[in-house]
Image (tube, rainbow, N blue to C red):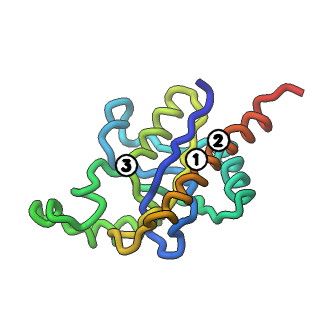
Amino acid sequence: MEVAVRMGTVMSMQDDMLGHFMVPLAAMRREGTSQAYVDLSYPAVADIELVNVMNETVASMGKRYLNGLNCTMDGFYSNMHDSRFSREWGRDMSRTFEEVKKLGVTGIDMESSCMMTLGRLMGVKTCVLTLVTVLENLKETLKGQERTDAEDLLCRTALEGIYNYHTKHCTKA
């Protein structure tokens, strides 16, 4: 395998991104899986050529994208939104969101940092193409047919982006 694209959803820290795409340049490693492979000091960084092709593909589909910094966390109910679980365990989600925003984080997910870290370690060009389906602490979400249509576009965009990357970087003249 030479190229891998994580296609999925993301929580945005910016209110104007609902229904748009994030193609992060890097991710904070606040999950445990990648730490089983390499020290936490090793960065989770996307392949810039693959990111650029995904950006072009998203734009060609008529959508907006943001190249920012994701923060990857393990627990949806414990780390990513205010829930009965987080309250019972004394976890203040507002402090978490304030902290990551202060650090310049634009999105929170559960997969990106592991994907980018392992890709780099294994010599696989990786990037992450995500659809913003929820805003900070679930204050707004994509629902119903709008979400279905957006997820369909996400799938088509990822496939088109991989094809475009292959055409641009892997085809011999």
The residue lying at 28 percent from left, 54 percent from top is 76
Distance of mark 2 from mark 1, alpha carbons?
A: 6 Å
Q: Up-down: is 7 above or below 11?
A: above
Q: Amino acid at mark 1?
A: Cys
Q: Is residue 105 visible?
A: no
Split into 4 quadrants, where in the image is the N terminus? top right
Q: Nearer the viewer, residue 145 or 138?
A: 145
Q: Which residue is mark 3?
A: 110
Could you tell me how far apart the alpha carbons at marks 1 and 3 are, in whole angstroms? 19 Å
Counting residues from the N terminus, which is met first, the one under dot 2 or under dot 3? 3
Instruction: Residue 50 in the image: state x and y as whole percent.
Output: 66, 43
Q: Report if the CB atoms under discs 2 and 1 are less than 8 Å apart.
A: yes
Residue 63 visible to the viewer: yes
Name the residue that disc number 1 marks: 155
Judge left or right: residue 95 versus residue 14.
left
Q: Amino acid at mark 2?
A: Leu
Mark 1: which secondary structure? helix
Residue tagged by mark 2? 159
Identify whether 163 is placed above or below 71. Answer: above
Does 27 sit left or right of 164 as displayed? left
In this view, the residue in front, 150 or 65, is 150
Q: For this view, does 33 lie left or right of residue 1?
A: left
- Amino acid on which disc 3 is placed: Met
